[in-house]
Image (spheres, rainbow, N blue to C red):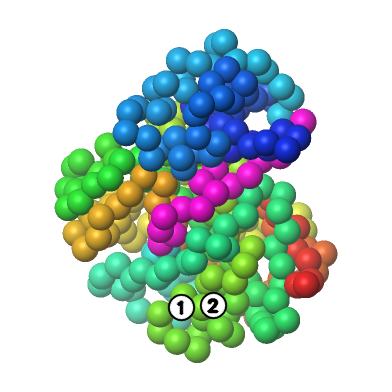
């Protein structure tokens, strides 16, 4: 199932994407939360409920709705650094022995088609195409063997990075958290449809030029190791967004560096999930 948060007219709601149409769940269940994050936070099995409503929901063309970030304001937006072997090599850094995590402020989240703004405070804004997953239920101290059971689904993240700010501090948070620097979407795909998340092809284009082309089998720490590691320290909650790292091909590693400029378009495609595309504009 492909779960989206959609805007039609003045309202938002949950939609299920079926080819080039969307089943408008809000039309048959207006009492439900208005984004996928709210649905996941319900105490009952919201995903099963939505699945049961699809056949009776009206279908509208996909092109007629605006796709928002599936989780409009994640409780936590956590991202791992240096998690593809080839990216570690292009960065000239040592392969990490332990997982390296940083926080992206949830106010950076935008959806499919929304503009990535280049802030006046930075001259080194870069793209990072990433597989991400969303936590489906509150959990602590989850074993590797049980980790798949707490993942509601998978999506795409562009971990946009202001490199000059990122490199000023070892925590990276400021350089990763500028407004609009967390494009997410276009929807969440449930695990049964994705299959093995560690065998997916990920590609990133800038203005039609292929920059990143990798598969998730190059991950150093897999998705289930991430859940096990994070939940050892903190409670994971429904709607938490976990981004799994970027492969090689980022702009800062090119010679000379090829960073984002106004007018660029960044397109990220992950096999089995879809396409996330965002234009780049000068900051206000």
Q: In this figure, which residue is indicated by the disc labeled 2?
A: 175
Left-right relation of 273 to 9: left
Quarter holding the C terminus is bottom right
Label 2: state its secondary structure.
helix
Q: In this figure, which residue is indicated by the disc labeled 1?
A: 172
Residue 175: tell me if it is visible: yes
Which residue extends farthest right?
A: 263
Q: Please determine whether, in this image, residue 137 is positioned above or below residue 16.
A: below
Q: Residue at x 44, y 35 (%)?
A: 39
Residue 85: tell me if it is visible: no
Q: Which of 2 and 28 is in front in this view?
A: 28
Which residue extends farthest bottom?
A: 168
Q: Residues within 10 Å of mark 1 (few under 14, many from 20)?
A: many
Residue 129: give x, y in percent of width and height.
Answer: 56, 58
Callouts 2 and 1 close, C-beta under 8 Å: yes
Residue 217: give x, y in percent of width and height.
Answer: 39, 50
Residue 74 forms part of the magenta stretch: yes
Q: Mark 2 and mark 1: span between their CA atoms?
A: 6 Å
Instruction: Name the chief secondary structure element in magenta.
Output: loop
Which residue extends farthest front?
A: 31
Label 1: state its secondary structure.
loop
Quarter of image, res 94: bottom left
Q: Please determine whether, in this image, residue 33 is positioned above or below residue 206.
A: above
Q: Please determine whether, in this image, residue 36 is positioned above or below residue 116.
A: above
> Which residue range is magenta in the image?
64-78
Residue 258 forms part of the magenta stretch: no
Left-right relation of 67 to 77: right
Residue 87: give x, y in percent of width and height.
Answer: 47, 68
């Amino acid at each position: 199932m492909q779960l989206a948060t959609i805007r039609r007219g003045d309202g938002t709601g949950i939609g299920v994407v079926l080819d080039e149409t969307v089943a408008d769940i809000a039309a048959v269940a207006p009492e439900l939360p208005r984004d996928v994050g709210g649905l996941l936070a319900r105490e009952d099995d919201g995903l099963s409920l939505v699945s049961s409503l699809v056949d009776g929901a009206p279908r509208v063309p996909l092109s007629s709705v605006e796709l928002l970030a599936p989780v409009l304001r994640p409780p936590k937006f956590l991202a791992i650094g240096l998690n593809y072997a080839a990216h570690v090599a292009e960065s000239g850094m040592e392969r990490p022995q332990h997982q390296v995590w940083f926080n992206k402020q949830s106010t950076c989240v935008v959806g499919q088609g929304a503009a990535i703004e280049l802030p006046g405070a930075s001259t080194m804004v870069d793209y990072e195409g990433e597989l991400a997953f969303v936590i489906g239920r509150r959990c602590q101290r989850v074993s590797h063997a049980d980790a798949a059971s707490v993942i509601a689904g998978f999506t795409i993240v562009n971990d946009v990075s202001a490199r000059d700010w990122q490199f000023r501090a070892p925590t990276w948070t400021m350089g990763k958290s500028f407004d609009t620097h967390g494009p997410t979407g276009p929807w969440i795909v449930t695990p049964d449809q994705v299959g093995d998340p560690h065998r997916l092809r990920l590609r990133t284009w800038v203005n039609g030029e292929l920059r990143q082309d990798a598969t998730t089998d190059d991950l150093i720490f897999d998705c289930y190791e991430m859940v096990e590691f994070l939940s050892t320290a903190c409670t994971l909650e429904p709607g938490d967004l976990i981004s799994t790292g970027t492969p090689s091909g980022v702009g800062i590693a090119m010679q000379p560096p090829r960073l984002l400029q106004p007018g660029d378009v960044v397109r990220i495609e992950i096999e089995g999930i879809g396409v996330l595309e965002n234009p780049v504009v000068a900051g206000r």
